[in-house]
Amino acid sequence: MLWDYRTPGIPDDLFETDPDVPITKEEVRAIVLGKLRLKEGYSAIDIGCGSGSITVELCLQTRSNNIYAIDFSKKAIDLTIKNLHKFEVKAKTITAMAEDVLPTLPTVEAIMIGGSWGNINRILNMATDKLAKGGRIVIDTILIETTYKTISALKRSRLGGIDITQITLAKSRQVSTGTMMLARNTVTVISATKP
C-alpha cells in the first residue's frame, strides 16, 4: 500500500496532479479531515473533488466504500479515479454539478465542500439535507467573497457549532544559498455540525 499510516496529510507529491485541476495541499487536507471528525465506517461526500486528494483520504480514514466524489470537470474526475487506483481505494465518482446530483445521494456523516462554483447557498442547503444528525460539514475557500457567503449561509442554516479557521502556510524550498520559505494561498476552513 502506498500510504500505510493512519494519519491524514499524505504528501502532495504522492498524488497524480494536473496544473489545470486543483489539489488541496497536504497541511490543509490534514486540518480539513480533522474538522470532519471521521470514524471508521462513516460515509462521506466530497463536493468539488478536484484531484481527489481529499476523496482518497476520506476512503483511507473511514475504510468505507460509501464515499462519493463530485466534480463538474471530467478532467478532475479522471484524475480522482487515477488517484483512487494509485492508493488502492474505492469511491463513487460523479461528473456533474453538485446541485444536480445531491438529491440522488444517500444521507452521510461527513460532507466536504471544496468547490461551489459560486452557488454556495444552494449547495450548502442541499448538503445539509444529506447530512446525518450529528454529521459534520466542512467548507474550504480561498476567496473572501466565498468565505463571506458561506458564513452568512451557515448563520441562516440549521447547522450549529460554526467554527472558522484561517490557515496561512509557507513551505520550504532549497535554493543555491540555503532554504527559503514560499507562501501558499491563505485558506479559510469553515466547519459546522448538524444538531
Image (cartoon, helix red, strand yellow):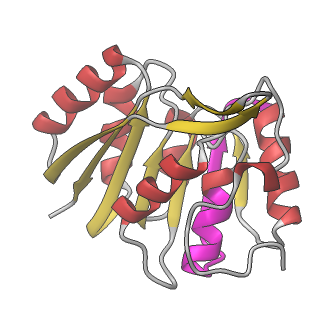
Residue 194, position in %: x, y?
21, 60
Residue appearing at x 38%, y 56% in the figure: 130
Q: Is residue 14 left or right of residue 47?
A: right
Nearer-the-camera pick, 177 or 51: 177
Residue 176, position in %: x, y?
80, 28
Nearer-the-camera pick, 121 or 188: 188
Pick out the residue farthest to the bottom: 40
Residue appearing at x 64%, y 70% in the figure: 59
Q: Is residue 70 magenta?
A: yes
> What's drawn in magenta, residue-wise?
55-74
Residue 182 is drawn in which quadrant?
top right
Residue 78, position in %: x, y?
85, 43
Q: Is residue 151 magenta?
A: no
Residue appearing at x 88%, y 63% in the figure: 86
Q: Is residue 188 left or right of residue 133?
A: right
Residue appearing at x 12%, y 35% in the figure: 156
Pick out the residue farthest to the top: 145
Q: Is residue 10 left or right of residue 109?
A: right
Looking at the rendering, in which quadrant would you find the C terminus?
Answer: bottom left
Looking at the rendering, in which quadrant would you find the N terminus?
Answer: bottom right
